[in-house]
Image (cartoon, helix red, strand yellow):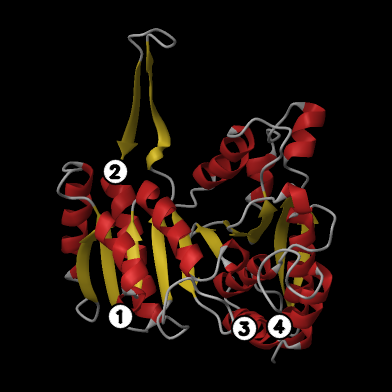
Amino acid sequence: MDEKEAGKVKSYDIAVIPGDGTGPEVVAEGVKALDAAAGKFGFKLNYTYFDFGGERYLKTGEVLPDSAISDLKGFHSIYLGAIGHPGVKPGVLEKGILLRLRFELDQYINLRPVKLYPGVDCPLKDKGPEHIDFVVVRENTEGLYAGAGGFLKKGTPDEVAVQESINTRKGVERCIRYAFEYTRKRNRRKKLTLCGKTNVLTYAFDLWERTFNELKVGYPDIAADYAHVDAITMWFVKNPEWFDVIVTDNMFGDIITDLGAMIQGGMGIAAGGNINPEGVSMFEPIGGSAPKYTGKNVINPLAAICAGGMMLEFLGEDAAGKAVEKAVMEVTARHIKSLQAGNMGHTTTEVGDLVVKHMPG
């Protein structure tokens, strides 16, 4: 990140995409928390807002303007609220905004912490915060989501549909290497698990497994192991405490992180990052736009606030990012009744105020 001249306050330029539905509401609370952290830890955040989303598309017929990618490359990071509009056919905005930004900004890592916070109800019997604290590193630009495939004789009884999983040595290697480095930096259990399906997907995961085994030689301090994806899903439920960091492909990562969100208490607390370690990254709450709650001031903003905390850590403001998380943990432990919209015991804005009130620093 570019540092200002000596004696001046360090600042970061943030592109904000509030998006659809309740996205603008949760982003507003996230910005409130981010500004509080910045004030306490001595840096500044400069926000530029973009109106990408369903309303823009319905008015203009344009999902993203031609200048969007080049414009966003000029920022230190992107802060996203939610994408998804009931008036737009599913897939149009998701592919045209989310996937396009991930692919064209080369955000090749999807980083998903799965952490149960104090006071949050967990659906797993006898499991608490001490059992659920792991991270999934998901490859984010290849696999089945690369869009390779097509139809033959579409619309006829003989129709054939093919969807291909694209896995390159470069893509697989950089994802696995990031996961080893992240496991080392996280410095918790120092264990990295490769999640795959080597017994059935014998081409794609042969590449993943070979690459994993080659790279682990350079990380003797990391305990490296392998598990089939079906075993992973069972162990998430039975023994989530076994995991530290998991690395996997795009499709399996998409699936297991949703299961992870449920065992950490639901989408209302799940945050993630789309990471380009050498470029512009994007941080977002995992939940959708929740259009039925739009404008009611009842949606839970904590996932968006957590995503903001992740963004600060990515920017190198580790203490500020951790302070955001500590404030959220204080709020979940002592100040809200539930993570569910309308059942928190506080409004959306009040929850944001509580996070600010309990921000350490």
Instruction: Tell me which amino acid carries mark 4.
Output: Ala
Q: Categorize mark 3 by other alpha carbons within 10 Å: few (<14), some (14-19), many (20+).
A: many
Amino acid on which the number 1 mark rests in the picture: Lys
Q: Distance between the residues labelled 3 and 2?
A: 39 Å
Image mark for residue 168: 2
Q: Are marks 1 and 3 in contact (CB under 8 Å)?
A: no
Residue depicted at x 27% and y 55%: 230
Determine the CA span between mark 1 and mark 2.
26 Å
Label placed on residue 329: 3
| Mark 2 burial class by Cα count in 10 Å: few <14, some 14-19, many 20+ | some
Q: How far is disc 4 from disc 1 in space, using C-alphas?
A: 37 Å
Rendered image: mark on residue 190: 1
Is 257 located above or below residue 71 in the figure? below
Q: Which of marks 2 and 4 is in front?
A: 2
Residue under numbered circle 4: 6
**What label sits on residue 263 in the rendered view?**
none
Q: Are marks 4 and 3 in contact (CB under 8 Å)?
A: no
Vertical arrangement, residue 354 with respect to residue 231, above or below: below
Instruction: Between label 4 and label 1, give the one nearer the viewer.
Output: 1
Q: Quadrant of residue 173?
A: bottom left
Establish if 83 lies above or below 234: above
Question: In the rendering, at what x and y percent does residue 265 appear?
Answer: 54, 70
Image location (x, y in percent) of residue 354: 77, 82
User: Can you tell which quarter of the image residue 301 is in?
Assistant: bottom right
176 sits left or right of 308 in the view: left
Q: What residue type is labelled 3?
A: Met
What residue is shown at x 66% (from left), y 46% (from top)?
83
Q: Which residue lies furthest to the front in this view?
A: 125
User: Could you tell which of marks 1 and 2 lies nearer the N-terminus?
Assistant: 2
Three-letter amino acid code at disc 2? Thr
